[in-house]
Amino acid sequence: AQTVTQSQPEMSVQEAETVTLSCTYDTSENNYYLFWYKQPPSRQMILVIRQEAYKQQNATENRFSVNFQKAAKSFSLKISDSQLGDTAMYFCAFMRYNNNDMRFGAGTRLTVKP
Amino acid sequence: NAGVTQTPKFRVLKTGQSMTLLCAQDMNHEYMYWYRQDPGMGLRLIHYSVGEGTTAKGEVPDGYNVSRLKKQNFLLGLESAAPSQTSVYFCASTPDLGDSGANVLTFGAGSRLTVL
């Protein structure tokens, strides 16, 4: 079974600075997808960024980027120019190709301080 | 532009009572999912459906039943609620699992269930 580990239960960062959230996963599959979801206090789950394992290029979405290290099974999220609205729980998730079972990590609670 | 709608948003039950959570999506998505979220454990898949009339077990199916009689609706039932089922429940949907990027899940806003 696939497992997803987020080793940082809580993190904080000053507004406008950069922060990196860690995620590692365990799988024997070669083809899969990785995701970062954001859950603000409203509880709504929002997709932040998505990475296909067959793509070597790291995904980027505006201030959000990932460092995908397939051999190390690592998938970290970098948030640049942090904003107060980035305060949320962040979940790393793994899904095998053509499979319905998306596995989530336990989450990292990020607080952006003014 | 409703997306995925869950009802009710909050519910308090007594041990042994039954209830049904309703998930409705207006995006014509084929796949629908029910997750539960517990502190320190992320989201775990309870049951899912790959189309109208089909259902399948996820990671933590015990104590729950589901039905997908209509494509747009996915119901999660608790026949005899237990305190261990106190959680926040999320419904999600996706068009399919292909390489077009359609395996991104769209989530509802969650339903907080407390079993006393």
Image: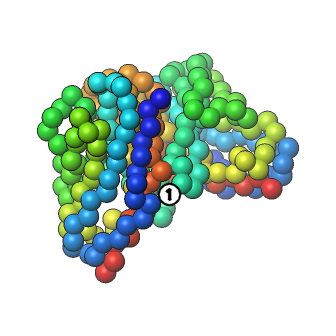
Residue A94 position, x and y percent, is: 38, 37
Instruction: Say left or right for B68 vs A105.
Output: right
Residue at the extreme top: B53
Residue extending furthest toward the bottom: A114
Name the residue: 57% across, 29% down.
B58
**B8 with respect to B94 (left or right):** right
Viewer-nearest residue: A14 or B53: A14
How many tags in the picture?
1
Q: Residue at x 36, y 25 (%)?
A: A28
> Disc 1 is attached to a residue of which chain?
A
Foreground of the two, A89 or B29:
A89
Q: Nearer the viewer, residue B17 or A26?
A: A26
The quarter of the displayed image where residue A57 is located: top left
Q: Is residue B64 visible?
A: yes
- Residue A45 location (% of width, % of height): 44, 51
Residue picked out by circle 1: A43
The residue under the point 18% across, 32% down is A55
Q: Is residue B2 visible?
A: no
Per the image, label 1 sits on a secondary structure element best described as: loop
